[in-house]
Amino acid sequence: MFKRTLLAAVSATLLISSFPSLAKTPTIDDKILRVGTDSSFAPFEFLSVEENEFVGFDIDMIKAIGKDLGYKVVVQNMGFDATIPALQSGIVDVVVAGMSITEPRKKAINFSDPYYTSGLIVLVQENNTTIKSIDDLVGKKIGVQIGTTGMFKAEKIPGATVVNFANASETFLEFDNGGVEAVIQDYPVVAYYLSQNKKGKMVGEKMDAEDYGIAIKKGNDELTAQINKSLAKIKANGEYARIYKKWFGTEPK
């Protein structure tokens, strides 16, 4: 579920002032697809230090869709909590940021057809023997990314101290430093973090299977239909499977 917090409103205002040329309602006639993302969500979207550019599964996918539609894809980085306000304000045309399709969000924005099925998982330190599942997080200090389904999951745990961070990178950094006892985050993001850092372990079962979708401004049914058609096309011609295997090492199920 998405909360339009004061932070989100401020972030959106800053984005508009920082990018005055984009503060109008975009049109699909200019053949530019303005894409909002949160570049701290590896392997879906992150900033490559070597190439100094946005990379990841979501980025490759939206570029493939843009190429199919004949659009130049321009990516803007922002906090996850600011993505929907940016979409509603017309700063971006779409958001691709590992965003779960939820009923509250569907009331505020359009979604494409699902393109990835995820779920939540608990991350703890490697030497932790007391936390074996989410049931053991009662009264614990938990790190989460603000505005995400992981945050709302953590807030339901009795007695837990939930610490919000602006992005996944900050959440993992605090975990590395021992500032939180556990993290609740999307399974593939935690799996990628562990593959790169090997600091910690996942415990318990994957929770709350949820579909990711590309977010589009509410009422822009033309662009929604175009994206759905292109998404189906790259799935049928094998391009989606190629991108999926590049980032996850397996064929999509």
Image (cartoon, grey):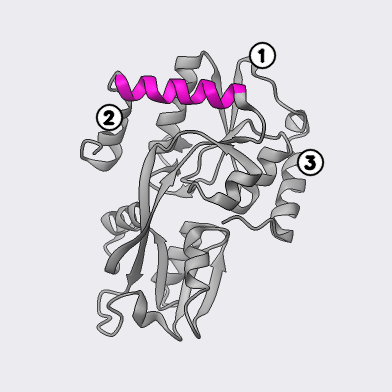
Element at badge 2?
Answer: helix
Residue 242: give x, y in percent of width and height. 27, 28
Residue under pointer 3: 17
Q: For numbered disc 1, what is the local secondary structure?
A: helix
Name the one closer to the observer, 11 or 252: 252
**13 horizontally vs 51: left or right:** right
Q: Residue at x 53, y 75 (%)?
A: 162
Label whose residue precedes the other's in the sequence (3 or 2): 3
For the N terminus, the quadrant is bottom right
Amino acid type assigned to the residue bearing label 1 in the image? Asp
**Marks 2 and 1: CB-CB under 8 Å?**
no
Looking at the rendered structure, the kind of residue marked 2 is Ala
- Crowding near pointer 2: few (<14 within 10 Å), some, many (20+)? some
Query: Which image quarter is the C terminus in?
Result: top left
Looking at the image, residue 56 sits to the left or right of residue 19; the answer is left
Q: Which residue is mark 2?
A: 241
Going from N to C along the chain, the mark reached first, 2 or 1, is: 1
- Tell me how far mark 3 sits from mark 2, CA to CA: 39 Å
